[in-house]
Image: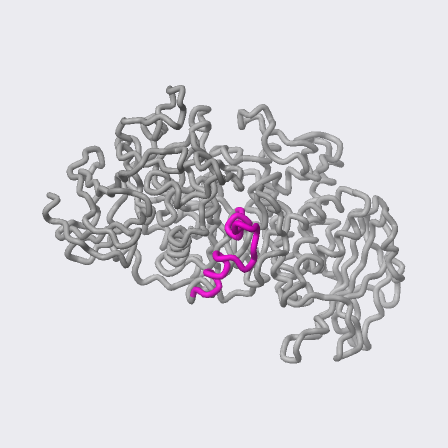
Amino acid sequence: MTPQKVTSGSAATLGAHHDGAGVNFAVFSENADKIELCLFSPDGKREVARIALPERSGPIWHGYLPGLPVGTLYGYRAHGQYAPEHGHRFNPNKLLLDPYARELHGDWVTHPATLGYDEGSSAQDLSFDPRDSAPFVPKSVVSDPALFEGMSAGRHNCSDMDLIYEAHPKGLTQANPDVPEAVRGTYEGLASDAMLAHLTSMGVQAVELLPVHAFVDDKFLVQRGLRNYWGYNSIGFFAPEPRYFGPDGLKGFRQMVARFHAAGIEVILDVVYNHTAEGDQRGPTLSFRGLDNASYYRLTAGQPRYYVNDTGCGNTLNVSHPYVLRMVLDSLRFWVECMGVDGFRFDLATTLGREDHGFDPRGGFFDALRQDPVLAKVRMIAEPWDIGPGGYRLGAFPHEFSEWNDSYRDTVRRYWRGDSHSAQELAARLLGSADKFDQGGRRSWASVNFLASHDGFTLADTTRYAKRHNEANTENNRDGHHSNFSDNGGVEGDTDDPEIRALRARRQRNMLATLFLSQGTPMLLAGDEFSNSQAGNNNAYCQDNEIGWLNWDSADTDLLGFVRVLSVFRQDHIAVRQSRFLHGAARKADGHTDVTWTDFAGEAVAWRDPGLANLCLTLRCSAEAPDFEPDGDVVFIAFNREDEDTSVVLPTPPEGQTWMRAIDTTSHVQEPRAEPEYEAVAVCANTVAAFVLISKEPEE
């Protein structure tokens, strides 16, 4: 390949696109003086051509190479100022990943040559490093267009109150003996027969996967013999992470999505568009920094050598820039239209909505999403915080978003631990956190309720450990959350004491029952259904091993069976999964209020009592529901946090009906039974009990 063969090509589509006769290359850089396309031998070890892209249309550099085949390996070198004090870090000695690359060839190697500066220099990042980084970075691949054809563009036809299952792409199956060994820890393994059977048995309707965008292991982790297990260190927003490839390579991802869809399960991706793997001014030059540092990143006002760090990860992607925003939107559409995914969970979503004046729910990023004809139809979930100014924004996102509700998690943990004032807070969380979300026409599904997520204690560890045990992270146990609101029952960690073990099992059942009986969207952390433990590690981001992987051999099958019962109950009873908020308004149909709070004697709740521990609520369909929606379902729920058995007065049932105890967390075995009429019924200590109306048996 010689430079004379290149023609102008087109700036219309960014990336490298094969049209059957050749390849069009187009890349954004507003501040570069020249962009060179570098072609490599099939093994990626030898640079065989270096061609300056001949045309610039605005900030898009482009060129067309006829005869270039699918599978060609390439990268870019960008020429321009190396002036970090002015925000520019061009260094043509660094081979750069195409931001639009859909496949990578080779691995990232932690090496000083990937730095744009000489780390041994007293001038630090103001110095300039002349070493070629090409031997230490993957090459971009000219993908076969056929790999991305024929995929449906996102289903999203399930209810927004459906059960979400958060899982790690590798850790879910790596140690599962029922998954074929060849596909454990891979995309194919996620949708293997064994996993589909497991997920469908629990009524899971959406799998939310931790990041699958290509990412890099942090230098400090590599030096400690660890890896970035969670993957929140993205570098390629269009390329599936190769470490999860199975026998079918990239095709395995689309096969996974197709199998999930065939089983009635959506695929939601956890996406990290708030920062990149290049870190702060001391980080490597891998792609964006070398192509146009001043455009891709938010730099400190008056000191553009440094990066705004609202993410806590060293840098912040500048989605306010039109071409950076375009890249994010193009990436999202690619995963929907070409890879078939159904929605996204946006990591540190506050960062994406922050304009120069602060967080703005009507900012450019949100406006662009909502007007996009493809993206406006998919499920969107926000992690509603970051560490920037005013970063905690729970309840402040546009109505199209649902949001991770950490207030729900903390409240449920505090209530079952026995904290004062927690019962009052629990009441709000049980009803979809209307105090935070009932505004601007939002629905109760906006609250994504969870007991645990990848970040923090698992549900089991919430009942086993009073403090974190992150020594394996090699940070002297300083990392991870301080406030876990956990309770070990009197012994830290594993124990053979039968009373403590029974207490912990009951606590897990109580919290799971609370989750499935709450209004909003329930999310279950993978493994919580069978009491998976991480040995007290509440920050297993670097534990690509038995700590981070699910331990299927020790699965509590009794707890799993209980979760299956809870899921069926939730699906069968619309009263516990309504889309509208309940405020105790009178229903037109029968004059009853849509929610009624009582104490165990059937009287008004003493809300001012700081030691309030027991609550009852009667749920009916919303007073605001239109006539065409299902109605008639009634559920009575009693929460007994006391250490003693007590009795509860059930509401008087309608003529011809009686109450049936359908859920009781006293035991993992559920035996629904009709209750005596007009009498107080027993509710055991530390128990959740749910009752439903059934028709009376005819008298003989």
Any magenta on residue 212? no
Query: Is 119 on the left-hand or right-hand side of 37?
Result: right
Picture coordinates of residue 186, whole percent (x, y): 40, 44
The image quadrant of residue 97 is: top left
Tell me which residue sits at (39%, 33%) in the image.
Answer: 84
| Residue span colored magenta | 348-372
Query: Is 254 on the left-hand or right-hand side of 697?
Result: left
Q: Is residue 173 visible?
A: no
Picture coordinates of residue 362, whole percent (x, y): 54, 60
Quarter of the picture holding the N terminus? top left
Quarter of the picture holding the C terminus? bottom right
Q: Is residue 263 visible?
A: yes
Above or below 490: residue 660: below
Tell me which residue sits at (57%, 60%) in the image.
Answer: 398
Residue in the foreground of this view, choosing between 366 and 532? 366
Picture coordinates of residue 151, whole percent (x, y): 35, 61
Above or below 562: residue 418: above
Picture coordinates of residue 688, whole percent (x, y): 75, 53
Tell me which residue sits at (66%, 64%) in the image.
Answer: 439
Residue in the foreground of this view, choosing between 555 and 317? 317
Residue in the foreground of this view, choosing between 207 and 308? 308
